[in-house]
Amino acid sequence: MPSIPAARLAAGTLSADFTEFGRWWGAYVRERRQAEIDIVGVAPDNVRLFCECKWRNAPTNEGVLDSLNELSKQFRYTARHLMLFSKSGFTDGCRQLASRIGNVELVSFEDIMTA
């Protein structure tokens, strides 16, 4: 069974053609600390996908999305897309923030298992 990004790539439903994926870690300049991004996707035309994966027994909250959004802003790309993967779904606050940001996809474990 393909993963959600692979299935979405194959179906052509992501907003860019991400061709390479990897992990990033380094300095978060704004907060002067080390940070990591679980998955970074590369697409042509200077477009990037930033993903965070949470395997917790509680829904992922807006703080996780806010942190990923802020961390991704330190990179200067033409367009940034965010994706959160969560074992236990998402809080209403996380869903509302995703809607406000507008370039975010929330993927629960249930979504992956039914894909």
Image (cartoon, grey):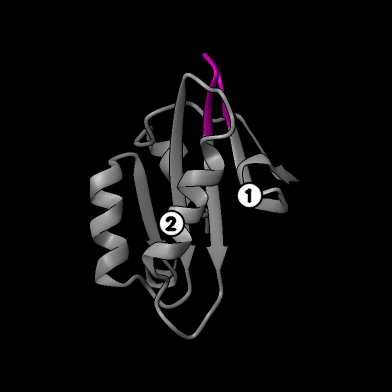
Amino acid at dot 2: Leu
Between 70 and 22, the residue placed more toward the observer is: 70
The C terminus, quarter of image: bottom left
- Pointer 1 or 2: first along the chain: 1
Q: Residue at x 56, y 23 (%)?
A: 76
Which residue is tagged 1?
Answer: 31
Which residue is tagged 2?
Answer: 65
Q: Residue at x 69, y 53 (%)?
A: 35
Residue 57 percent coordinates (x, y)? 48, 86
Is 82 magenta? The answer is: no
Q: Secondary structure at mark 2?
A: helix
Residue 70 percent coordinates (x, y)? 49, 45
Which quadrant of the view contains residue 55? Answer: bottom right
Q: Residue at x 52, y 59 (%)?
A: 1
Residues drawn in magenta: 42-48
Query: Of the numbered discs in the image, which one, if any, rests on residue 8?
Result: none
Amino acid at dot 1: Glu
